[in-house]
Image: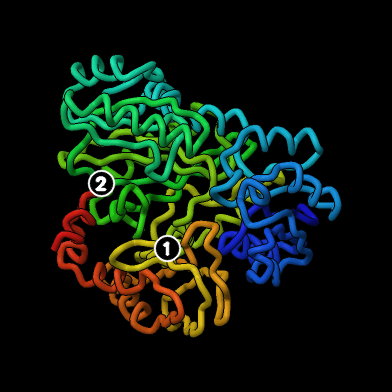
Amino acid sequence: MFKKILIANRGEIALRIIQACRELGIQTVAVHSTADAESLHVTYADEAICIGPPASSESYLNVSAIISAAEITGAEAVHPGYGFLAENAHFAEVLEECNLKWIGPEPKNIRLMGDKAEARNTARAAGVPVLPGSQRALEDAEAARALAAKVGYPVILKAAAGGGGRGMRIVHDAESLETQFSTAHNEAEKAFGDGTIYLEKYLVEPRHIEFQIFGDKHGRVIHLGERECSIQRRHQKLVEESPSPALTPELRKEMGDAAVKLAKHVGYTNAGTVEFLLDLDGSFYFMEMNTRIQVEHPVTEMVSGVDLIKLQLEVAWGHKMDVPTGWTARGHAIECRINAEHPERFTPSPGRIVTFHPPGGPGIRLDTHVYEDYLVPPFYDSLIAKLIAHGRDRDEAIRRMQRALEFFVVEGIDTSIPLHRRIMQDRDFRRGNFSTRFMERFLSR
């Protein structure tokens, strides 16, 4: 096994990787910007290296600084976490050239599945259902208009290199298409340095279901069940759970088999997520594949009993996966993303935490890098904690989450805790009766 790895990330995911490494006897190197000098991942790593000022472009996205930190400390491998450089094939290739192992999928898979339009073509070639739409990038708004007329409105424009809802626009008619195409293109160019746009049919009331897949270097590919990710605002996930209340055992098997089929088709290794849209009639369609560990991976860990970060490390080293095929989910798990933002206006709320009382009790897990007197910086994603509740069934998981949210006290900044309390009390949510439009209706009440 690796003796020492560098973690090219920050916050709770960096701390989560450190925890897995401690169990495996692996030493860790934390990198941090000057703004993150007091973060817990810096405190708990065996070594810490400052790699630049607060701006991500000068620190967490600074490939040269990260590689230099790895070489100085004698790290053998790099774990990218999620975000930042986690899906950057060039970074993975540069690491290999510098004799540093990449803890993630092969660069060719990152590149192939990272281009959303090409990923659709790959899924189609693998025999996985795909929504009607582009088979290649759209050159301009006229090309989009012609395809939309063939597919039928509404359609959705998406950034080929995108994610997280950026460079994404829903178009309901031909009159607004040109403006929306220009907006999506410009947003994608700014966010990803690539303004390429593709188009697909827009489902009005879908559910967002993703399957956690894993492949090792010995040809074995498995899935570890699904996560329900339909509770989202502006394509940003707020609540995730496993298993999905919408899936029958037969549909779960069909979707899981499709996810594994796609991963095998591309020779996938390490952690990944195949994301689907599930229509009201039970039809499902490939949406995209994330070639990294996900923010919401803890819900899968809770119901599967598998430490996904440790499995990433073991697979990267070359071990065979020892996860049994045909496992059964153990109970139900729900995750709430706790953000430093106003719970109604959704505006960021950086600042110093003056009171921090984390919840506990049966079935509760909290992944966080913050603490009392911690200064939440304004430079990064607003996520400060992930609260996970596990129960024997969905009802118990919801009740435990409600209790944990009531006991969770964070003062000095605004957080999304009050919003999550309201969601857990919502009748439609409790019944499992929702789609990706849930928050749109929820916030209008």
From the image, tell me which residue sits under label 1.
348
- Percent across and percent down for residue 154 are 18, 31
Amino acid type at mark 1: Pro
- Percent across and percent down for residue 390 are 39, 70
Query: Quick check: 375 left or right of 407?
Result: right
- Real-space Cα separation, disc 1 to disc 2, in angstroms: 27 Å
- Percent across and percent down for residue 379 are 55, 58
Residue 356 seen: yes
Where residue 37 is drawn, which disc sits there? none
Give the residue at x 50% y 32%. 114
**Mark 2 burial class by Cα count in 10 Å: few <14, some 14-19, many 20+:** many
For marks 1 and 2 on the same chain, the one whose residue lies earlier in the sequence:
2
The answer to which quarter of the image holds residue 391 is bottom left
Front residue of this view, candidates 420 and 96 = 420
Front residue of this view, candidates 229 and 57 = 57
Give the residue at x 77% y 59%. 49
Front residue of this view, candidates 105 and 1 = 105
From the image, tell me which residue sits under label 2.
207
**Mark 1 burial class by Cα count in 10 Å: few <14, some 14-19, many 20+:** some
Amino acid type at mark 2: Arg
Vertical position of residue 86 compared to residue 19: above or below: above
Give the residue at x 53% y 76%. 352
The answer to which quarter of the image holds residue 428 is bottom left
SS assignment at label 2: strand
Query: Quick check: 427 left or right of 33?
Result: left
Query: Quick check: 29 left or right of 16?
Result: right
